[in-house]
Amino acid sequence: EAQVTQNPRYLITVTGKKLTVTCSQNMNHEYMSWYRQDPGLGLRQIYYSMNVEVTDKGDVPEGYKVSRKEKRNFPLILESPSPNQTSLYFCASSPVGQATEAFFGQGTRLTVV
Amino acid sequence: AQSVTQLDSQVPVFEEAPVELRCNYSSSVSVYLFWYVQYPNQGLQLLLKYLSGSTLVESINGFEAEFNKSQTSFHLRKPSVHISDTAEYFCAVSDRTGRRALTFGSGTRLQVQP
């Protein structure tokens, strides 16, 4: 089954404790990205990757890091989480091309206390 | 840069009634247009998209949207809703070049009541 898998689905952590949210896709897509969803704001792109070893900032990259060492994986790293990073996070992937559909993971609800 | 405005944060409607969810966008370049649906505790799923050609696009579950270039709108409609349509709906645009990010509206929660 074609899918984007995020882990964990739920996470509560404390301020300053480094964490990683994993994302993996099995569709051989070149393009992957991370979004955060906040009430009243919709989804905003954090980082994206056009291919292996190629990453770039989205609209709200501050406080986040990513890496793309393999095509299928695109982890999101919070080196020193803060309460304003409490949010619902989605990973998405799509093939490179014009207007292709983005496939989303199930989401990770992160709470930073 | 692009922006998307969804004018209604919530739309309550009775089952079998028609519904329209409004979406307006702003962009200095040509864009693709999308509607995504998010059911409770799930990720987003593509509902329909406009790339080019016919300005009326349809989904497999009875939704349709019409691209209106002069009004920069992409409203979503369904002539008769079901309880199972209860979800949050996001309008989004994507530029045709560059980083191809989806720019989302703030979402409209459709609540279908029996």
Image: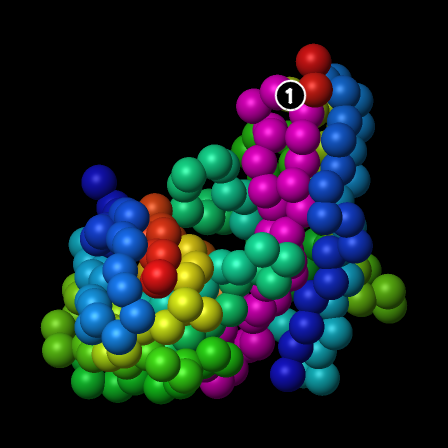
Q: Residue placed at 51% from the left, 43% from the top?
A: B38
Taking the image as drawn, is residue A70 in sight?
yes
Residue B96 covered by magenta stretch: yes
Q: Which residue is under mark 1?
A: B82
Observer-nearest of A51 and B111: B111
A98 lies left or right of A29: right
Q: Residue placed at 77% from the left, 49% from the top?
A: B8
Taking the image as drawn, is residue B34 in sight?
no
* Relative image position of residue B9 (x, y in whole percent): 72, 48
Query: What range of the chain is rendered magenta?
Result: B83-112
Above or below, B91 against A18 in this view is above
* Relative image position of residue B26 (x, y in whole percent): 74, 74
What residue type is disc 1 on?
A: His
Q: Residue placed at 64% from the left, 57% from the top?
A: A40
Q: Residue placed at 61% from the left, 62% from the top?
A: A41
Above or below, B27 against A19 in this view is below
Asked where in the image residue A15 lies, by quadrant, the reply is bottom left
Question: Chain under label 1?
Answer: B
Observer-nearest of B84 and B50: B84
